[in-house]
Amino acid sequence: MDKIEALEEIKSIWNDEENNLGQKIIKVSSAFYDAGLDLSTTAAYINATPAELDALLALGALDDELIERIGEINPPKTTWQLLANASEEEIQQALNALEENREKSAENRVHSALSEFIYQQMIEVAGPTTEQKVGMLSGADLALAQKKSEDFTALSDWDKKYLKSVAAQKKRGKTLSSKQLPILLRILTELADKGVITRNSIDGDQETCDRILDAIGKE
């Protein structure tokens, strides 16, 4: 499938109301990554916001059983990013809360009210984990970390290649999986421990360094 065909397929899936959210997650993610599409172009083509599409793609990294459950509950778009950045326990609690809320109500609440309800449920469970914060770093942030690691010869060959790979993935709009994040956290922590990423950088990149250190929980 070439990129034009993939864009057409994603647009059709996105607008098909017969597909539940779980089916959309699987089908859209497959077409997006198989064709090597970028986030902004695809979002514009299907008349979605980049945030909406990014959240749906992030949900594609979840276990199949969770995706199936999400398809059954069909939460509104405004909750997708919250679910994508949550742990499995938090997702299950949020979905349970949404399901119970719908069962108690004679009529479903409007999506904005549901979104606020889910948000409060998830905040009560926990804030974002360190790994989730690392997952929110941009491709540009990770690319700078990768460049500094080479300048300082601070990482093993494998870690350098890994950091370069995930930086490129983020630049293409991909959301990192739950398996990738612990490795990335370890690498960034090593760079901080070795003084490559620091609060008093002299390389004119203090804002980015601070953002990375905040994400990994380093002073």
Image (cartoon, grey):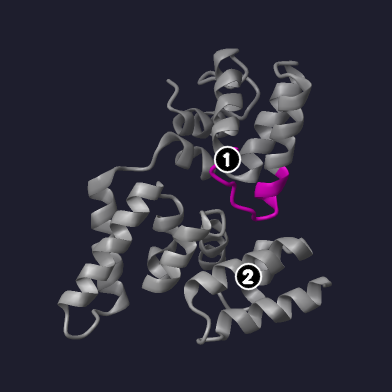
Q: Viewer-proximal residue, 134 or 40?
A: 134
Which residue is rendered at x = 29% and y = 55% of the image?
Answer: 93
In reply to whether residue 155 is colored magenta, the answer given is no
Q: Which residue is mark 1?
A: 179
Region in magenta? 168-180
Name the residue furthest front. Answer: 65
State the quadrant of the N terminus.
Answer: bottom right
Residue 106 left/right relative to 6: left
Q: Which residue is mark 2?
A: 28
Tell me the crowding category of disc 2: few under 14, some 14 to 19, or many 20 or more residues within 10 angstroms, Cα based.
many
Q: Is residue 67 above or below residue 109?
A: above
Name the residue furthest right. Answer: 2
Q: Viewer-proximal residue, 172 or 94?
A: 94
SS at badge 1: loop
Q: As shown in the figure, which amino acid type bears the numbered disc 2? A: Val
Q: Is residue 82 above or below residue 106?
A: above
Q: As shown in the figure, which amino acid type bears the numbered disc 1? A: Lys
Of callouts 1 and 2, which one flags the residue occurring earlier in the amino acid sequence?
2
State the quadrant of the C terminus.
Answer: top left
Residue 53 in the image, given as x and y percentages of width and height: 56, 66
